[in-house]
Image (cartoon, helix red, strand yellow):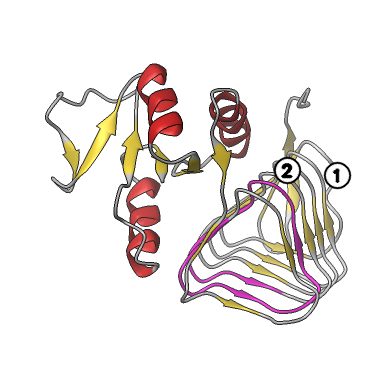
Amino acid sequence: MLVIGAKGFAKEILEVLHQLKMTEGTVFYDDVNDFLPEDKVHDLFPILKKMSEARNYFSTHDSKFTIGIGNPILRKKIKDQFENIGGEFTSLISPFAKIGHYGNVIAKGCNIMTGSVITSNVKLHTGVLINLNCTIGHDSELGCFVELSPGVSISGNCNIGDYANIGTNATVLPNVTVGKNVVIGAGAVVTKDIPDNSVAVGIPAKIIKQRSQIND
């Protein structure tokens, strides 16, 4: 598998690959940081630096890739770039996450990290990132490229819009809708619906500013 990114969250992706016994043949891609030609992640895993190298990897080794970088909008852009050169956007789910047996739907390219809990009738759209120790209650739906930071709690019957970014240890109470392109601050408690393109913080969460609309 090709992991996009070679620092930070990408190393947590590597841990999940290790848990799944899928590290053989793993390579990383990073054209942003200044790595030397001989550099490897943990001195074991090669780092590709050019799109031509990634294209060759897809055609000769393995077409699967996952994204080891946060930021919902950036993840969408990366997904499109690497699909366009032959990559297959692939979900990666820790075996130490707990996922219920009934009614759950997980689309392509989702990352579900260690310690997270998904109960039942939960729908995750393309590219969702569920970080360490998050919980998602029954009948909730997370839109494309939603990012949950560590320790987020999404209660039952919630709807989280595309590209929303929920901060560490935030809580969304039952039957709440968080709109598209919303940022929820760390530790916030969301007690009522938050409209698209908003930033909300605090207990209870209150809107403090607006964001530019996404044209996707």
Location of residue 145 in the rendering, given as x and y in whole percent from the top left corner: 66, 44
- Quickly name the residue at label 2: 182
Circle 1/circle 2 CB separation < 8 Å: yes
Our reading of the magenta stretch's main secondary structure is loop
Secondary structure of residue under mark 2: loop
**Outermost residue, front direction?**
60
Q: Is residue 174 above or below residue 74?
A: below
- Measured as percent of width and height from the top left, residue 116 is found at 55, 72
Task: Tell me what residue is drawn at x 55 percent, y 65 percent.
Answer: 169
Residue drawn at the location 13% of the way across and 45% of the way down: 43
Which of these two is toward me, 153 or 102? 102
Place of residue 151 in the rendered image (x, y in percent of width and height, measured from the top left): 53, 68
In the image, residue 150 above or below residue 54 = below
Looking at the rendered structure, the secondary structure element under dot 1 is loop
Q: Is residue 166 above or below residue 89?
A: below
The residues colored magenta run 111-136
Closer to us: 182 or 70: 70
Residue 168 included in the magenta stretch of the image: no
Determine whether, in the image, residue 92 is placed left or right of residue 193: left
Q: Amino acid at mark 2?
A: Val
Residue type at numbered disc 1? Pro
At label 2, counting other C-alpha atoms closer than 10 Å, the crowd grade (few under 14, some 14-19, many 20 or more) is: many
Q: Nearer the viewer, residue 215 or 23?
A: 23
Q: Quadrant of residue 156?
A: bottom right
Q: Which residue position holds label 1?
A: 195
- The quadrant of the image that shows the C terminus is top right
| Disc 1/disc 2 C-alpha distance (Å) | 8 Å
Instruction: Tell me the quarter of the picture where residue 19 sits.
Output: bottom left
Q: State yes or no: residue 132 in magenta.
A: yes
